[in-house]
Amino acid sequence: MAVSVDTDDKFAEYAHPERLVSTQWLQDHRDEPGLVVVESDEDVLLYETGHIPGAVKIDWHLDLNDHVERDYVDGERFAALLGSKGIARDTTVVIYGDKNNWWAAYALWVFTLFGHEDVRLLDGGRDKWIAEGRELTTDAPTSTPVEYPVIERNDSEIRAFKEDVLAHFGNPLIDVRSAEEYSGERTEIPGYPTEGSLRAGHIPSAASVPWARAAAPDATFKSREELEAIYKGEAGLADGDDVIAYCRIGERSSHTWFVLTHLLGFEKVRNYDGSWTEWGSAVRVPIVTGSEKGEVPAKR
Amino acid sequence: MTDTQLPDTLREIKDEFLALEVRERLQLLLEFSNELPELPERYRDHPDLLERVEECQSPVYIFVEVDDHNIVHLFATAPRESPTTRGFASIVSQGLAGLTVEQVLAVPDTYPQQLGLAEAVSPLRMRGMTALLGRTKQQLLRKAAA
């Protein structure tokens, strides 16, 4: 890796400590050559109100999603995007964002689809940086464009499609939405069919673990012990499991994907980004309502 | 409704956005965001009086008043950490300022799509402003029916 890893004691407990950096580490290293800091938020304007000096912005709607088809950008557009932000293939990228790094984890997951090797999260994200009174600026960064190679996305390792979920039954599924979404109590508001789906409930046999349970009140990740109690203890995951996580559009579940893969060391975790907005509108897929997981459906 | 029939302020806001490059439109939205006034005292301590606009990704609450001259006043609040939502609320509230109930109800539902912001913030996020305008009209209709 181009830039040294953060040897913070807390991170040493995790399966892949090199995937996290602390706010202090970033403060000390942010000007190092070979490092680019990326802000990725839910709110498209938040970066403009003030960001970590030198950080560039990548927006999930505008930059990472295709604008016509429901898919991510292709290799060519990803290369153009990263090159324009001064990110080369061997650049160390540290991503941070609002809301417990929700969208930052999503961006990291998309970077991983393209096999960008050294991509890390700032533990605690934007909130912790601000809470500690660290510097923010509204000055636009001056990134020198670089060449990023065109690498096609690899959707086979960490991304699951609806068909993959149907063939996955009998293996663990994690539903990371709120309890109300899981049980199917939350329905659409009359007259405003926005990001909804036609049916409510969850995929049978999925365990409910709302994504933000992985975060401590200061927006950092909980300790390995606490995370194991949640995902292995409560949700019943065991080492070696093949896991699929989902939410509504795949953003919250990329946060859980990060936790399972990089903090707990599960080697086969996929994010089903079609998630409830696809499943809840699909024809002839099994759904259960209520707070129970439901029977495991037959594989299809 | 054709362009010339848009109430003046709404038309001016639209012209202002369309005159800019896409990237600059985001800056203008940020200016609107910063201009969203604080809630009047009578609502500050009564969040229960405000209606949450569920369609927005971030929590935004609105309250619509009609004064004795049939003029609509829209009050809105959204957290500082949600500048896009604040910007949308500010545009709607400034754009509708001084209009009568009938004029507000006649504002085309597609007005948010006319600002050229979809490219700058994404079509999905624009739904938030469409919902704000829709909710405002609904509140007026409910008041009229009451």
Image: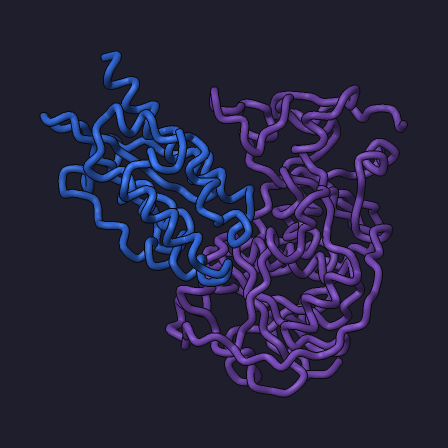
Chain colours: A purple, B blue
Residue extending furthest left? B68
Q: Nearer the viewer, residue A170 or A99?
A: A99
**Figure quadrant of residue A150:** bottom right
In the image shown, does A294 or B49 lie closer to the viewer?
A: B49
Figure disc tally = 0
- Is residue A245 in sight in this rendering? no
Is residue A271 something one can see in this rendering? yes
| A19 displayed left or right of B105 | right
Is B41 drawn above or below residue A12 in the view shown? above
At 35% across and 37% down in the image, what residue appears? B4
Q: Is residue B121 above or below residue A149?
A: above
Residue A138 point in image, percent of width and height:
41, 72
Question: How far from the left and from the top, in percent, is residue A201?
Answer: 64, 25
Which quarter of the image is occupied by the C terminus of chain A? top right
Looking at the figure, which quarter contains the N terminus of chain A?
A: bottom right
Q: Is residue A254 left or right of residue B92?
A: right
- Residue at figure coordinates x 62%, y 82% from the top left: A144
- Percent x, y of residue B6: 33, 36
Name the outermost residue toward the top. B145
Residue at coordinates 69% horizontally, 40% vertically from top-left? Answer: A246
- Of B44 and A46, nearer the camera is A46
Q: Quadrant of residue A85?
A: bottom right
Residue B96 rendering spot, x and y as whole percentages: 27, 37
Q: Nearer the viewer, residue A98 or A263?
A: A98
In the rendered structure, the answer to whether residue B11 lies left or right of residue A106 reads: left
Q: Residue at x 71, y 78 (%)?
A: A91
